[in-house]
Amino acid sequence: MSKIDIGIAQADREAVAHGLKKLLADSYTLYLQTHNFHWNVTGPQFRELHLMFEEHYTELAVAVDDIAERIRTLGIAAPGTYKAFAELSAIEEVEGVPEASEMVRLLTHAHEQVVKTSREALKLAQQADDESSAALISDRMRVHEKTAWMLRAMVQ
């Protein structure tokens, strides 16, 4: 591969990529959790939650691709295994099938965690003067903040 010369030092690209790897792992874990809940939700809010969870995991599927491609743009290999995601993610895996209200609570906390992970990755991108990564991360943060707000509103 030829030398990457995009105005960001190698050490900075590696630091930003590491933050993005954590964001990718959290996003993929949330994607999987949301898809699982989509398949398994039951109860009086079935239709509403089933459709909402589908909207969320569909949006996340695009997001994980965008994040992984940004990591590759920085010249770093993107993680792509469950093992790697489990090691990098701050979102805990859910065992079994919780009740619908618990699914909403768990997803709310998971989206909030992605926001916190995004904030850490954003600091790294800003320090590296990496506007492209910062824009991607900021956009992701906004989506997860809004989604967490909407999920919280469902249980109040």
Image (cartoon, rainbow, N blue to C red):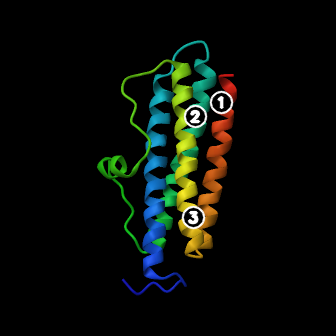
Depth check: give the residue in front, 70 or 126: 126
Is 58 placed above or below 102 here?
below
Residue drawn at (37%, 67%), measured in percent from left and top?
Answer: 77
Side (left or right) of 107 relative to 11: right
User: What residue is disc 3 on?
Assistant: 123
Is 41 placed above or below 136 here?
above
User: What residue is disc 1 on?
Assistant: 152
Which three-letter amino acid code belongs to the residue tagged 2? Thr
- In the structure shown, which secondary structural element does the residue marked by tag 3 occupy? helix
**Real-space Cα distance between discs 3 and 2?**
23 Å
* Badge number at residue 108: 2
- The residue carrying pointer 2 sits among few (fewer than 14), some (14 to 19) or many (20 or more) residues within 10 Å by Cα, namely some
Residue 144: image quadrant is top right
Is 125 placed above or below 28 here?
below
**Image quadrant for the N terminus?**
bottom left
**Image quadrant for the C terminus?**
top right
Q: Position of residue 109 (x, y in %)?
A: 54, 36
**Real-space Cα distance between discs 3 and 1?**
27 Å
Q: Residue furthest top?
A: 44
Q: Position of residue 31 (x, y in %)?
A: 48, 42
Residue drawn at (52%, 16%), measured in percent from left and top?
Answer: 42
Which three-letter amino acid code belongs to the residue tagged 1? Arg
- In the structure shown, which secondary structural element does the residue marked by tag 2 occupy? helix
Q: Does the CB distance between marks 2 and 1 fall below 8 Å?
A: yes
Side (left or right) of 141 relative to 42: right
**Foreground tag (3 vs 1):** 3
- In the structure shown, which secondary structural element does the residue marked by tag 1 occupy? helix
Which three-letter amino acid code belongs to the residue tagged 3? Lys
**Real-space Cα distance between discs 2 and 1?**
7 Å
